[in-house]
Image (spheres, helix red, strand yellow):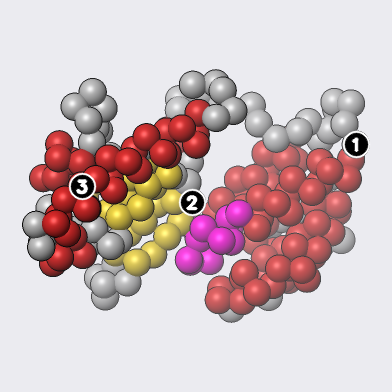
Amino acid sequence: MGTNCAPLFADLFLYSYEADFLDGLLKKKEKTLARTFNFSFRYIDDVLSLNNPRFGDFLHLIYPIELEIKDTTDTVKSASYLDLYLEIDTRGRLNTKLYDKRDDFDFPIVNFPFLSGNIPEAPAYGVYISQLIRYSRACEVYNDFIDRARLLTEKLLKQGYVAPKLKSSLLKFYGRHHDLVDRYNQTVSQMKLDLFPDVSSS
């Protein structure tokens, strides 16, 4: 931990066990079982397995016994993975929204730049755009996107940002990345109204 090579080293270390496990299945001619791991993904030590209800039965055969495995699945149809919350709806579709484990903390988190600090203004407002991009990529549904964006907007306003410049940043986001929000079928005017309900329309 703490070294530049740690993520790559962890990836290679765990991949060696996963590759050995799958090679073993193929040598035993268990191709059908091997295919059930087609939708298994790992980022460093976070693993996601879709459509494989027996994945947990094989963990002790895949990874070394020294590795502590924690199941963080909420239900058979919902789970958090990295910064996403995934849920299969009643029609069998996979929906995603942003997941931030810091939301569960019982104390306020200090993040994002304060304009009272000695930082350039342009990059600070760029943070607003970058977070809107992140939210729109993660959230399938408009309400989830706008709820997260509203929390960010309120936080930045308290940290010295001004509404007209945040609105200008919103317009830049919409103009440059409207392809990310087209599925919401919402105009930028509606977004502005939803994000700045208590601020004049300037």
Residue assigned mark 2? 98
> Is residue 38 or residue 119 the one in the foreground?
38
2 with respect to 31 (left or right): right
Q: Residue 36: x percent and y percent?
A: 19, 62
Residue that appears at 61% across and 70% down = 181
Is residue 25 located in the magenta-colored stretch of the structure? no
Within 10 angstroms of label 3, few (less than 14), some, or many (20 or more) residues? Answer: some
Query: Picture quarter containing residue 65?
Result: top left
Q: What stretch of residues is rendered in magenta? A: 134-146
**Could you tell me which quadrant the C terminus lies in?**
bottom right
131 with respect to 12 (left or right): right
Q: Residue 156: x percent and y percent?
A: 73, 40
Residue 8 visible at all: yes
- The secondary structure type at the circle numbered 1 is loop
Main SS of the magenta segment?
A: helix
Q: CA distance from mark 2 to mark 1?
A: 28 Å
Query: Which callout, 2 or 3, points to the residue nearer the camera?
Result: 3
Within 10 angstroms of label 2, few (less than 14), some, or many (20 or more) residues? Answer: many
Residue assigned mark 1? 120
Residue assigned mark 3? 21
Residue that appears at 43% across and 44% down = 43
Q: CA distance from mark 2 to mark 3?
A: 32 Å
68 with respect to 194 (left or right): left
- The secondary structure type at the circle numbered 3 is helix
Amino acid beneath label 1: Pro
Q: Residue 92: x percent and y percent?
A: 26, 72
